[in-house]
Image (cartoon, helix red, strand yellow):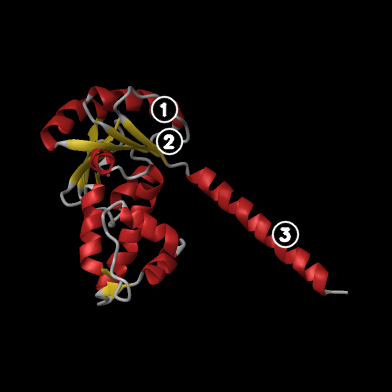
Amino acid sequence: MSSNATQRRGIPDATVTRLPEYLRALTALAESGTVRVSSEELASLVGVSSAKLRKDLSHLGSYGVRGVGYDVDHLSYQISLALGLTHDWAVAIIGMGNLGRALAAYNGFTSRGIQVVALLDRDPAVLGRVVAGLAIEPMADLPRIARERGVAIALVATPARSAQEVADAVVAAGIGSILNFAPTSIEVPDGVRVRKVDLATEVQILAFHQLQHDRALLSGLRTVIP
């Protein structure tokens, strides 16, 4: 994602986090042959209110046409442009354990303007192995790889104990954006963008909401049953 592009447009961070969901829904609509979509229909697909969707899209200068809706292809292009997806971004995945290999094998990157150009690890036992068509290379080569292949984003999928050291190496190699899958926080200098993906936390949040749902359901049953 191009944070510079969205900042220039003055798009709030909360809106930026929803734009990929709008784009995913629009892509599915286009694949089904849908040419136009109303704000209510698109909002329902994404799971937000139509008012929130219209406000989000207004930051792109897209307001739709009353009674007609949004042109699916044009809105997809606007969102792609705002997210910096109109050209490919080179990505390196660091840490080739189970998660790293799963990320490397994910086939949804290419369709979203993301090109995985390098897989790296420090473990001599895995170097040279081929995953998803790419050979695993040594971390020591990261500066050269970043320079030669134009790596813009690093996906860090290492254990927590090595995440900070890896982040330091990523910064030193001149890579300006990090997606951190390691179960720990990392510190980076100003100007380096970091997003954290904590899978365990996301599952715990879902568990909380599931518990609330189950309690509400049980409470309703107790109210009905004498």
The N terminus: image quadrant: top left
The residue at which mark 3 appears reads as 215
Q: Nearer the viewer, residue 77 or 211?
A: 77
Q: Tell me if residue 7 comes above or below residue 206 in the rendering.
A: above
Tell me if 50 is positioned left or right of 119 in this view.
right
Residue at the image position 63 percent from the left and 51 percent from the top: 208
Q: Amino acid at mark 3?
A: Arg
What separation in Å lies between label 3 and label 1 (alpha carbons)?
Answer: 37 Å
Determine contact: label 3, label 1, CB under 8 Å: no
Label 2 residue SS:
loop
Q: Are marks 2 and 1 in contact (CB under 8 Å)?
A: yes
Spatial separation of the CA atoms under disc 2 and disc 1: 9 Å
User: Residue drawn 37% across and 60% down?
Assistant: 54
Q: Position of residue 101 (x, y in %)?
A: 33, 46
Residue 13, image quadrant: top left
Q: How many marks?
A: 3
First reached walking from the N terminus: tag 3 or tag 1: 1
Dot 2 or dot 3, earlier in sequence: 2
- Which amino acid, mark 1? Ile
Residue 167 x/y as whole percent: 34, 27
**Crowdedness near tag 2: few (<14), some (14–19) or many (≥20) residues, C-alpha within 10 Å:** many
Query: For the point 31% across and 51% down, which residue is it?
Result: 59
- The residue under label 1 is 186
The quadrant the C terminus occupies is bottom right
Within 10 Å of disc 3 (Cα), the crowding (few <14, some 14-19, many 20+) is few
Front disc: 3 or 1:
3
Task: Mark 1: give few (<14), some (14-19) or many (20+) Cα within 10 Å.
Answer: some
Position of 125 relative to 36 (above/below): above
The residue singled out by tag 2 in the image is 182
Mark 2 is on which residue type? Ala
Residue 61: x percent and y percent? 26, 55
